[in-house]
Amino acid sequence: MTATHSTRMLILGSGPAGLSAAIYGARAGLAPIVVQGIQPGGQLTTTTDVENYPGFREVIQGPWLMEQMQAQAEHVGAQMMWDMIVDVDLSQRPFRLTGDGGTVYVCDTLVIATGAQARWLGLDSETRLRGQGVSACATCDGFFYRGKKVAVIGGGNTAVEEALYLTNHSHDVTLIHRRDTLRAEKILQERLFKHPGIKVLWSKEVAEFVGGEGNQGLVALDLRDTKSGEISRLEVDGGFVAIGHHPATELFVGKLDHDGDGYLRVKPGTSYTNIPGVFACGDVADKVYRQAITAAGTGCMAALDAERFLAEQDFEESEAA
Ligand SMILES: Cc1cc2nc3c(=O)[nH]c(=O)nc-3n(C[C@H](O)[C@H](O)[C@H](O)COP(=O)(O)OP(=O)(O)OC[C@H]3O[C@@H](n4cnc5c(N)ncnc54)[C@H](O)[C@@H]3O)c2cc1C
């Protein structure tokens, strides 16, 4: 027989957004259930050094930070479920969601915090050197490359923005693009081309990320010319893959409003989606900032919005009675 769990607040996702929502929801007496998904702790569990999460003078480790957040959420009364939601019925309240083992979750409010994963090139050498010179987030890791040579791979807005951001730390930034024109907005392209610290390599793709001896991490990129096939080597200390993100919103297609890239739309300044009682927070609704602290902040907002929504519903029901 499959289990059924009922809750005032169901939270999908256990990254900074989901766990912050859990802390606020639990402290509001809503006894939230958090469905953790296949990546308990979210994206920060895949990194090592975190230097920009407020509250810590020394560098902390991503997995440690997420363990602390989970422990805090459990301590104040949130319940963690190791499950993955595969089906969602938002046609009426309470909402009904189903986990991949058949467990059913019935909830008065739903907080969606399923995140957005960076797209990678898919090379084995890229996977091997992630966190050792290979990154997908200049805001997160650019600071570690002060005075060093870095490359950004991509040709859209994200790539150009990452390259411009990296000039705060490095005077030697190379943008590598496999075509001979960029897709980025014209205004960004103008800023890029005018910047003395950035050069562009056209019609090149990364054939391999090259690691150094022992634990040295990334030392170079082997580049393939997309026209001639010729291979050349570019020595770099950091390689930033900036080919976009993929918000985890497949479950909600046709059910919730989203933008052209799949990010959930929320009412500006709130976490309200187009369905009353459904709230979105963190990277799944944020294509601009995508940081742990912004995810945590909007997670807090989602819990507060959900609590107020429930209070209004309760009041209306008691008035009607
Ligand atoms: C390598 C790396 C390094 C980074 N470094 C930094 C840094 O130094 N500082 C910083 O501020 N930010 C950093 N970031 C960005 C930061 O990790 C994200 O902005 C943040 O984790 C987003 O939080 P989130 O809660 O919105 O989503 P996520 O952390 O992506 O969590 C999403 C959660 O949703 C769950 N989920 C997905 N689908 C389902 C489903 N169907 N059912 C149930 N659960 C589901 C997943 O299991 C996961 O728990 C880094 C990111 C990466 C990848």
Image (cartoon, rainbow, N blue to C red):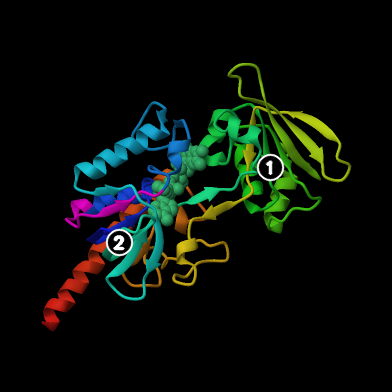
Instruction: Give the residue at mark 2.
Output: 104
Task: Give the crowd class for mark 2: few <14, some 14-19, many >=20 residues within 10 Å.
Answer: some
Q: Where's residue 137, x and y in %?
A: 55, 41
Q: Nearer the viewer, mark 1 or mark 2?
A: 2
Q: Which residue is mark 1?
A: 153
Q: Is residue 262 left or right of residue 154?
A: left
Determine the residue located farthest toward the top in the rendered image: 214
- The span shown in magenta is 26-37
**Residue visible at 47% across and 70% down?**
257
Query: Which quarter shows the N terminus?
Result: bottom left
Q: Is mark 2 within 8 Å of ligand 1?
A: no
Q: Measured from the top left, where is residue 274 in percent x and y?
A: 40, 72
Viewer can see residue 28: yes
Quadrant of the rendered image containing residue 230? top right
Q: Residue at x 74, y 36 (%)?
A: 207
Q: Check the picture and name the quadrant holding the C terminus.
A: bottom left
The amino acid type, in three-letter code, at marker 2 is Val
Mark 1: secondary structure:
strand
